[in-house]
Image (tube, rainbow, N blue to C red):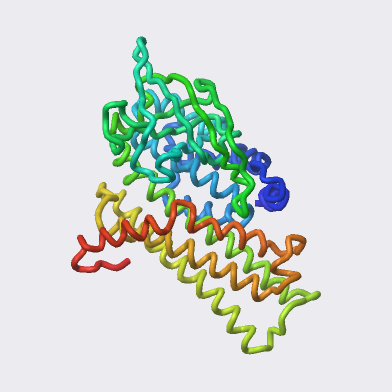
């Protein structure tokens, strides 16, 4: 945590990947947190995953989000990769040697997860040929491996998607565009052009079966992990804000004022509601996995979508309230000793990170299948 906090402002200012923080994650074994123990990882459950994501989010949100997306990829390989691929990849992740980036975006389809345009082809030697352009890839410059969505073949429909693993060494990787955003600057989510060949056994989940991998692994890991990161960032900012009001050199609004206390309470309520729903959905997903039930059940899909929307909106609302509370100098200034301004900018991106509008539309459709209205 100290390393993440030390470099968070510099990473944000320079819009560079948090290499120091990721070095710490590698050294402490956190890159392999969700890797099963038989491959040398910690074999942690979703409760530990969510807890760690909150802690990392409180130190550097860019680091935490990149780590969560790496854990998505790791979980997908652990659950759906073939035995040879698991043996090839997971021990390296557990040793901190392999950071895996997600390649799901395409220019023609934006961030729509369950479709693909660029097709796989098969070389004369039976290897899979990858030719792929992605406009946004978190940590593209520093990843040692990639999980890439591809159309199953040129003559298949867009929803016939395969998920393919590739080591960086197997690809020609060309960075495109630039990353100069309002927030999430340290994720350095550049565009990339990927070209190369991989063995046929590096398809994760089977040819054309990405939807199952997404529903059972990548989507729940994303929504739980992202929500935890956002909550951790907002919680840490609130903690520092309160400390500034209570210390010996206290500054800011008069805490004896009832209006001031009400404003603080509203910030806390936003975070309490996020935390409560996050914990509830995490328990629901953990129970389904323990019972070998599909995470594609209608009610669970609604709850996962709702979690992402609620967490992104309420944590940003809390950050907005903190800026207003702390004022121009302490809350809105980049030079403030409080991380409120940076947290505000980072959390503004939360609703855009897989757009809430798309999730709300999907949830509205799912609601028509849940006549009993089973609430979380």
Q: Position of residue 322 (x, y in %)?
A: 63, 71
For the point 40% across and 59% down, the residue is 357
Q: Position of residue 289 (x, y in %)?
A: 31, 49
* Left or right placement of residue 74 versus residue 288 in this view: right
For the point 49% across and 55% down, the residue is 352
Q: Position of residue 183 (x, y in %)?
A: 61, 54
State the quadrant of the C terminus: bottom left
Image label count: 0
For the point 35% across and 53% down, the residue is 286
Query: In which quarter of the view is residue 233 placed?
Result: bottom right
Residue 294 to residue 309: above or below:
above
Query: In which quarter of the view is residue 209 placed?
Result: top left
Residue 322 to residue 262: above or below:
above
For the point 67% across and 73% down, the residue is 242
Evaluate whether residue 32 shows in this view. yes
Front in this rendered view, residue 67 or 46: 67
Front in this rendered view, residue 45 or 193: 193
Front in this rendered view, residue 89 or 119: 119
* Left or right placement of residue 166 versus residue 252 in this view: left
Query: In which quarter of the view is residue 256 placed?
Result: bottom right
* Left or right placement of residue 96 versus residue 123 in this view: right
Evaluate whether residue 283 shows in this view. no
Q: Position of residue 368 (x, y in %)?
A: 21, 63
Residue 354 to residue 37: above or below:
below
Residue at the top extreme? Answer: 124
Residue at the front extreme? Answer: 108
């Amino acid at each position: 945590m100290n390393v993440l906090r030390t470099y968070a402002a510099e990473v944000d200012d320079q819009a560079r990947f948090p290499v120091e923080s990721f070095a710490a994650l590698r050294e402490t074994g956190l890159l392999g947190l969700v890797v099963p123990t038989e491959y040398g990882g910690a074999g942690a459950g979703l409760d530990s995953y969510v807890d760690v994501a909150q802690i990392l989010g409180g130190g550097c949100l860019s680091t935490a989000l990149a780590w969560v997306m790496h854990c998505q990829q790791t979980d997908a390989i652990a659950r759906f990769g073939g035995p040879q691929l698991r043996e090839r990849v997971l021990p390296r992740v557990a040793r901190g040697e392999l950071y895996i980036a997600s390649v799901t975006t395409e220019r023609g389809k934006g961030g729509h997860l369950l479709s693909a345009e660029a097709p796989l082809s098969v070389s004369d030697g039976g290897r899979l040929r990858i030719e792929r352009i992605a406009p946004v890839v978190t940590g593209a410059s520093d990843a040692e491996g990639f999980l890439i969505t591809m159309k199953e073949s040129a003559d298949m429909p867009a929803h016939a998607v395969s998920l393919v693993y590739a080591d960086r060494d197997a690809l020609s990787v060309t960075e495109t565009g630039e990353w100069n955003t309002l927030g999430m600057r340290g994720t350095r989510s550049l565009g990339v052009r990927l070209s190369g060949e991989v063995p046929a056994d590096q398809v994760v989940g089977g040819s054309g079966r990405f939807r199952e991998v997404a529903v059972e692994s990548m989507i729940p890991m994303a929504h739980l992990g992202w929500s935890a990161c956002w909550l951790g960032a907002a919680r840490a900012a609130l903690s520092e804000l309160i400390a500034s009001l209570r210390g010996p050199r206290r500054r800011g609004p008069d805490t004896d004022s009832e209006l001031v206390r009400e404003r603080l309470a509203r910030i806390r309520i936003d975070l309490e509601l996020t935390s409560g729903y996050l914990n509830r959905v995490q328990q629901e997903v953990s129970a389904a996995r323990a019972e070998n039930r599909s995470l594609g059940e209608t009610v669970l899909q609604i709850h996962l979508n709702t979690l992402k929307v609620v967490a992104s909106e309420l944590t940003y609302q809390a950050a907005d309230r903190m800026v207003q509370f702390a004022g121009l100098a302490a809350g809105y200034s980049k030079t403030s000793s409080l991380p409120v301004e940076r947290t505000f900018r980072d959390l503004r991106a939360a609703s855009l990170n897989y757009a809430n509008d798309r999730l709300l539309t999907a949830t509205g459709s799912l609601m028509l299948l849940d006549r009993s209205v089973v609430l979380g």
